[in-house]
Image (spheres, helix red, strand yellow):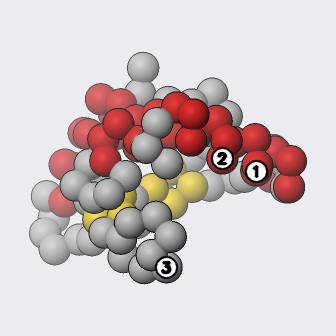
Amino acid sequence: MRDKKDIERIADEIENYAGLDRIKLIHLNDSKGVIGSCIDRHEHIGLGKIGMKGLSCFVDHQAFRDIPLIFETPKKSEEDDPVNLAKVRKMIR
């Protein structure tokens, strides 16, 4: 999930198996684990294995652009959410 091609494949799979119209909300986070590791550990936006490029391709993709996002990132201080939000806002074109 690190480039436009990966995001396009994911969007196509969702459309084929469930339908994009059924997606009502997306939990957004970066990942501490590499793909296929079966590790579900969340990381702050841009600091994990997906990275800024992959997340940017995702949030700016036409299929996901109008779906509400909520953070599913670690929260150790009150500043964490505003920092993550600022990064995501910069990704949206």
Seen in the image, is 2 located left or right of residue 9? Answer: left
- Residue at 50% across, 70% down: 36
* Residue that mark 3 sits on: 38
Observer-nearest of 13 and 22: 13
Of circles 3 and 1, which is in front?
Answer: 3
* Residue that mark 1 sits on: 14
Estimate how packed mark 1 is, as few (under 14), some (14 to 19) or many (20 or more) residues with alpha carbons within 10 Å.
some
Residue 10 circle label = 2
Residue 14 at x, y percent in the picture:
76, 50
- Residue at 28% across, 58% down: 48
Indicate which disc, 3 or 1, sits on the residue closer to the N terminus.
1
Pick out the residue farthest to the top. 93
For numbered disc 1, what is the local secondary structure? helix
Q: Is residue 66 visible?
A: no
Instruction: Indicate the amino acid at tag 3.
Output: Cys
Seen in the image, is 54 located left or right of residue 27? Answer: left
The reply to whether the C-beta atoms of the residues labelled 1 and 2 are less than 8 Å apart is yes
- Residue at 42% across, 20% down: 93
- Residue at 49% across, 48% down: 1
